[in-house]
Amino acid sequence: MSEDVFEVPARNEYRYLVQDEGEEEVQYVRRHYVSPFLVLSRRCMFLIACGVLALLALAGYLAYVAQTPPPGFAEVVTDFGWLRGRHQGGAYSFSGIPYAVPPVGELRWKPPEDLKHAGKCWHGVYDATYVRNVCAQIQPLERNGSVTGKEDCLHLSVFTPSLRPAERLPVMVWFHGGYLHMLSGQEKGYSPTELAAQTNTVFVSLNYRLNAFGFMALEVLREGSPTNTSGNYGFMDQILALQWVQRNIHVFGGDPGKVTIFGQSSGGTSVWTLMMSPLAKNLFHRAIDMSGSYVYNASLESAEKDNLVFLRKTGCRDAACLRKLSATQVLQAIPWEEYPYWAAEDLTDIPVKGRFCGPVAVVDGHVLPLPPFEAWKKPGQFNDVPFVVGTTQQEADYSPIMKNISQWTWADYEWFVREKLSPFGNVSVSEALRLYNSSAPCPINDRCPERLYTTLVSDMRVTCPNNDLAKRAKDALSSPVYRYIVTYTPSKAVDFAPWMPFPSRFSFRLLDSLAFFSSLEMVLGTMSPEDKAFQDLLTKYFIYFAKEGKMPADWPEFVSGTALLDKSLRAERDPFSERCRLWEEQDFYKYAWIN
């Protein structure tokens, strides 16, 4: 047999021709032929490929080593990119996470922009081991106060006991207080790292735009607005943050179907706003309002007119000019002392007849289509979720107008009540002195005039109006409504400047939020067993509510009972009803806290 080779060009294959000697028949056998040159080339290519793969493997290993978090740290991936947080105190914390494009320059006084939609996601691993800027603000609330913070401040933080729990965990989203003017979601005493570990709950805190940057309503700011409104930008920030929670909280072990929003002071007002906003529908499932506002009915048009004083003080006539101002110029132009009195200095005293603070949050037709009480009359216009309304018995005692109130005698007390209430008529004076008299029980005998005066102010400004708020909620919601009043007196005076500029010893404003975040020791120095019992009590009930969407059986729904929180819980039906009837009948609810 002889064997020759030829090429079949059409198929670009080499074949062997096999022909038997003495025969004409030709057989084609398909076999691959590789020339020595091709064999050498392929061997070289194989070696090169192996080298490349080895280099790639080495590079991948080095990248893995470089990105693998060191001990005490952890990484998760969100829809914005990778985050690196830390593990300490039994929980993971991821801090300073941006949730919106910085609202600076042309984005000042505009709705927040989602990072992902704007194509602003980061590359690599974002360092979420420390907090970033607080939002631009001024303290104290006056023209010459100290300016702090930045406009680039829209960050949130997440604290979780486990990134991979057997079952997804309840989530609590905290809105900080500060009159919608100051403070942040990263204040001392409000870091829930250990609380997350102890309660097996995921916590989220956030910054949102404040004061003029977050709530200035002006007609000139409607120019170019996609919503044809102005103001309430801070609430839009909160809504965007809740959308972030819905998309991402599962990677932190949280359950997006079990989100509780809660806040104190203007944080409580934020909770109430989101309950009424169609933009927040399905973003949360329980709500806790701690010492929030009662007065909330200003129209956008009236607020825009009231705020013209701000526009005049800036020297601007249009939005373009306003957006070129420095943060300090904006803050100094806010009407702190003149109407609309954004400093709200007199809210901790008996009101001056006919003097009202102007609104910061407004019924803008976008975030808030209707005033809350009107929305509650229209089914489908609000978010129907389990709702807790809470206050403290001496809200005004954290910063009374008269700083010598601790030294008052009973004669001083009676003089001030008569002097300040007399413009409202003899009935207000006589009934107030009858219902708030020296026979009232007092745990600290040498400071009873202080306690009674701040109780009187708190009842007319906060406690009684919030009773009415809870009643309206009960009539509107199919979900359960709960009411509490903190009556506990701590073991010693507090020391928590600048949050608490006065050394209160009674059931002061903030007492409930400090207790929930296990921060009473920070403000008291040391804690008595009674302090600890009160702190544990409040935390237990709030966590139960976040997990179950209701309170335990010993805390009845409103109006069947109001929970009086001391070292233990005592439920009473309509406590302080006679006192509240006085302030309602004398039309004092219009002087209730605003903002």
Image (cartoon, rainbow, N blue to C red):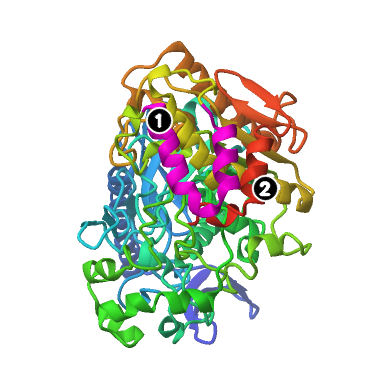
Q: Is residue 9 left or right of residue 275?
A: left
Q: Residue at x 56, y 22 (%)?
A: 566
Vertical relation: 297 (above or below) 257:
below
- Please name whichever residue, 348 or 482, is drawn nearer the observer in this view of the structure: 348
Magenta span covers which residues? Answer: 409-437
Identify the residue at the far front of this view: 426
Mark 2 vs mark 1: which is more N-terminal?
1
Give residue 486's position: percent from left, percent from top: 55, 30
Residue that label 2 marks: 468
Q: CA distance from mark 2 to mark 1?
A: 33 Å
Amino acid on which the number 1 mark rests in the picture: Ala
Q: Label 2, secondary structure: give it.
A: helix
- Please name whichever residue, 335 or 128, is drawn nearer the observer in this view of the structure: 335
Q: Quadrant of residue 581?
A: top right
In the rendered structure, are the residues bearing label 2 and label 1 in contact, judged by CB atoms less than 8 Å apart? no
Q: Which mark is residue 411?
A: 1
Identify the residue at the far top of this view: 529
Disc 2 residue crowd, few under 14, some 14–19, many 20+, Cα 10 Å: some
